[in-house]
Image (cartoon, rainbow, N blue to C red):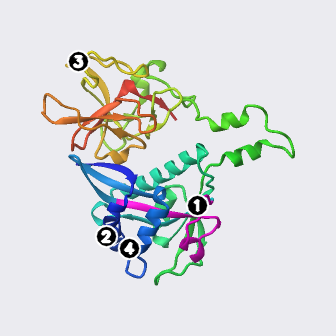
C-alpha cells in the first residue's frame, strides 16, 4: 500500500485537482478551471493536497482550497475575493477522489489543514481567528469530527441544494492575553512570552521506566479481539519541548518480536531515544494497522534498507512535528507500522 502525504498543490497539479472537483460535485456546484487557478495563484498556502506516494512518484487524491476574508460569515461576496491578511479562512472545497473515499483520507487532510493554520497562528506569522465553510446537512457529522460547530442555514445559494454554515475557532494569543487583563491592568512580565512558547512535554507523560510495573501498566485488553492487548494511554513524542500526540489510546497492539537495527551501525540513537536490543534479540513494539491514517502524527523517511527475512526495503517513522526518530519502521508498501514501545512517552 502506498503512503499518504500532505503538500501544497502546485499549478502543475491543478488539472488533477479539477478532475477530483468535477467528480465530487454536481455540475451546478463544481468550481471552474479559472476559479481554481485564481485560488492557487493568490492563496497557494491555503491550497493543500493529499498525495498517494509510491516508489518515487505521487498522485493527488484529495485537496482543500480556501481564500481569506475579513467577514465573520460566509457570503457570496466573502467567497468571491481573496483579501490577504484577513482573519477568516473561507474554505471553498474539501474533496477526495472517489477511489479513496471512506478511508479517512478526508478527515486526516482536514485535521492537517487545521494543524498547519494553528501552527502559523502560534508562530504569529498570520492573524487568523476562524475557519468558515458551507456544506450540505448530510456532511455535518464529518466536519464535527474535525471540531467544526454548526451555525445553521447559510444565505449562500449555489446549485439546487440548501447550504449550511459551520465554523472552527482558531486558537488566538490575543484572546489568551485579553483574558489575563483586568481593565487597564498591564500584562505581567513574561506572560506573553510564555503564551508564545510551545508547551513542554505534557506533564503527565512518562517513559516505561516511570511506571511501577513497567509495560504491564501500559496495556489493556482489546475489546474487539480476545487475547490481544492495546495501548492504555496516548503515545507521545519523547522529545522535551514537543510531546506531540502520535497515536490515540487503544489503537496500537502490543507485540514482542525481533528487534530492528534502525540506526546505521556505529551510530548511537538520538539522546532522546532509548537504544534497542541488538537483533536477533526481541523488543517490545506497538503494531498499527492497516494504514498510516491511524496515526495522529507521523512522518516517514525514504526507503533505506532491506529486512533480512523479507528482502523488502523499510521506511523509518519519526515525529512529524519535530522530526525526532527513528521511532519505528514499516516495510515499503506494507500495511503494518511498528513503533518501539521504549521510544515513545505515555500520557493522557
Between marks 2 and 1, how big is the CA–CA gap?
A: 27 Å
Q: Are there few (<14), some (14-19), or many (20+) residues within 10 Å of tag 2? A: few
Residue 82 falls within the magenta-colored stretch: yes
First in residue order: circle 1 vs circle 4: 4
Between marks 3 and 4, how big is the CA–CA gap?
A: 57 Å
Residue at 39 percent of width and 65 percent of height: 95
3 vs 4, front mark = 4
Residue, disc 3: 281
| Label ID, residue 19 | 2
First in residue order: circle 2 vs circle 3: 2
Q: Nearer the viewer, residue 227 or 184?
A: 184
1 vs 3, front mark = 1
Which contiguous range is marked in magenta? Answer: 62-86
Q: Mark 1 touching mark 4, by CB under 8 A?
A: no
2 vs 4, front mark = 4
Residue 128 falls within the magenta-colored stretch: no
Q: Are there few (<14), some (14-19), or many (20+) residues within 10 Å of tag 1? A: few
**Residue sticking out furthest to the bottom:** 160
The x, y position of residue 187, in whole percent, is 79, 38
First in residue order: circle 2 vs circle 1: 2
Residue, disc 1: 84
Between marks 2 and 4, how big is the CA–CA gap?
A: 10 Å
2 vs 3, front mark = 2
Amino acid at each position: 500500500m502506498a503512503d499518504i502525504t500532505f503538500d501544497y498543490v502546485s499549478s502543475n497539479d491543478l488539472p488533477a485537482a479539477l478532475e477530483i472537483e468535477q467528480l465530487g460535485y454536481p455540475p451546478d456546484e463544481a468550481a471552474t478551471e479559472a476559479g481554481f487557478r485564481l485560488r492557487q495563484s493568490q492563496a497557494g498556502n491555503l491550497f493543500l493536497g493529499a498525495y498517494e506516494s509510491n516508489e518515487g512518484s505521487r498522485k493527488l487524491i484529495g485537496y482543500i482550497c480556501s481564500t481569506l476574508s475579513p467577514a465573520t460569515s460566509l457570503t457570496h461576496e466573502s467567497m468571491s475575493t481573496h483579501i490577504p491578511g484577513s482573519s477568516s479562512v473561507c474554505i471553498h472545497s474539501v474533496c477526495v477522489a472517489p477511489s479513496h473515499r471512506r478511508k479517512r483520507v478526508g478527515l486526516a487532510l482536514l485535521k492537517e489543514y487545521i494543524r498547519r493554520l494553528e501552527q502559523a497562528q502560534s508562530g504569529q506569522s498570520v492573524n487568523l481567528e476562524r475557519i468558515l465553510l458551507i456544506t450540505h446537512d448530510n456532511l455535518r457529522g464529518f466536519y464535527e469530527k474535525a471540531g467544526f460547530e454548526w451555525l445553521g442555514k447559510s444565505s449562500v445559494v449555489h446549485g439546487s441544494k440548501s447550504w449550511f454554515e459551520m465554523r472552527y475557532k482558531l486558537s488566538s494569543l490575543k484572546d489568551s492575553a485579553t483574558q489575563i487583563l483586568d481593565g487597564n491592568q498591564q500584562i505581567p512580565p513574561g506572560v506573553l512570552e510564555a503564551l508564545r512558547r510551545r508547551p513542554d512535554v505534557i506533564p503527565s507523560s512518562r517513559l516505561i521506566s516511570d511506571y511501577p510495573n513497567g509495560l504491564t501498566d501500559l496495556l489493556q485488553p482489546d475489546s474487539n479481539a480476545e487475547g490481544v492487548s492495546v495501548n492504555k494511554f496516548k503515545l507521545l513524542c519523547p522529545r522535551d519541548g514537543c510531546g506531540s500526540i502520535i497515536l490515540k489510546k487503544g489503537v496500537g497492539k502490543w507485540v514482542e518480536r525481533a528487534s530492528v537495527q534502525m540506526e546505521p551501525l556505529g551510530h548511537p540513537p538520538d539522546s532522546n531515544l532509548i537504544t534497542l536490543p541488538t537483533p536477533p534479540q526481541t523488543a517490545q513494539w506497538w503494531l498499527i494497522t492497516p494504514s498510516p491514517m491511524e496515526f495522529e502524527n507521523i512522518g516517514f523517511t525514504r526507503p533505506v534498507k532491506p529486512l533480512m527475512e523479507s528482502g523488502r526495503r523499510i521506511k523509518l517513522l519519526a515525529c512529524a512535528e519535530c522530526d525526532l526518530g527513528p521511532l519505528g519502521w514499516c516495510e515499503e508498501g506494507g500495511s503494518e507500522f511498528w513503533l518501539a514501545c521504549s521510544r515513545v512517552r505515555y500520557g493522557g
